[in-house]
Amino acid sequence: MAADLADLEAYAGGLIANLTGAERRALARKIAITLRGLEQRRIALQRNVDGSPYEPRKPRLRDKGGRIRRTMFAKLRTARYLKVEASESEAMVTFADQVQRIAQVHHVGLRERVSTKPYREISYPARDLLGFRDDYEASIADLVVLHLAQ
């Protein structure tokens, strides 16, 4: 599989180099949008990049019946906050400026001061919000082939 991807990369690299700047930017945008969708699905499944489940919320974040009030990161994974950026040479998925601090705290697993009284600091476990899985390469390769075929 890796050899096939390397061959495809060598072959497609030359074809991509022949594209105009606008065509490369459009391809990078398609790749970034595809990656965003893959990441949104992974976050919705509450899985880390390696496939392990997120560490569950602490009991105090549950309602009186013991149910979780809402899925973790439901708003963070929306297109409003999970942005795509593309240029001729790169495709990137990132969080919007207003939620980058929240995403960083949860991604790295930092301590954060919560705004409920009494004020206290809570240690959050690390939960991979963004990352690159090996199976994403195949999706990107398929997307590149489809784009070049057009």
Image (cartoon, rainbow, N blue to C red):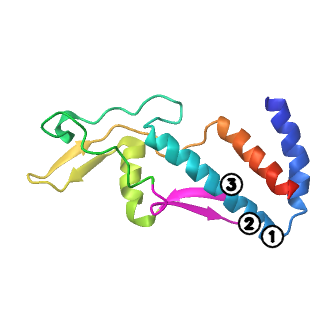
> Toward the viewer: 52 or 111?
52
Residue, x 87% and y 54% (percent of image)? 149
**Residue 14 in magenta?**
no
Q: Which residue is mark 2?
A: 25
**Secondary structure beneath disc 1?**
helix
Residue 90 visible in the current orientation: no
Residue 131 visible in the current orientation: yes
Residue, x 91% and y 46% (percent of image)? 11
Q: Is residue 52 left or right of residue 87?
A: left
The residue carrying pointer 1 sits among few (fewer than 14), some (14 to 19) or many (20 or more) residues within 10 Å by Cα, namely some
Residue type, label 1: Gly
Cα distance between the residues tagged 3 and 2: 10 Å
Q: If you read the primary sequence from the N terminus, does the residue marked by circle 3 or circle 1 appear first?
A: 1
Residue, x 48% and y 35% (percent of image)? 48
Task: Establish if 13 lies above or below 81.
Answer: above
Give the magenta range: 78-95
The residue carrying pointer 3 sits among few (fewer than 14), some (14 to 19) or many (20 or more) residues within 10 Å by Cα, namely many
Residue type, label 3: Ile
Circles 1 and 2 in contact, beta carbons < 8 Å:
yes
Q: Quadrant of the C terminus?
A: bottom right
Task: Establish if 140 lies above or below 54.
Answer: below
Q: Which residue is mark 3?
A: 31
Any mark on residue 21, and which? 1
Circles 3 and 1 in contact, beta carbons < 8 Å:
no
Residue type, label 2: Arg
The residue carrying pointer 2 sits among few (fewer than 14), some (14 to 19) or many (20 or more) residues within 10 Å by Cα, namely some
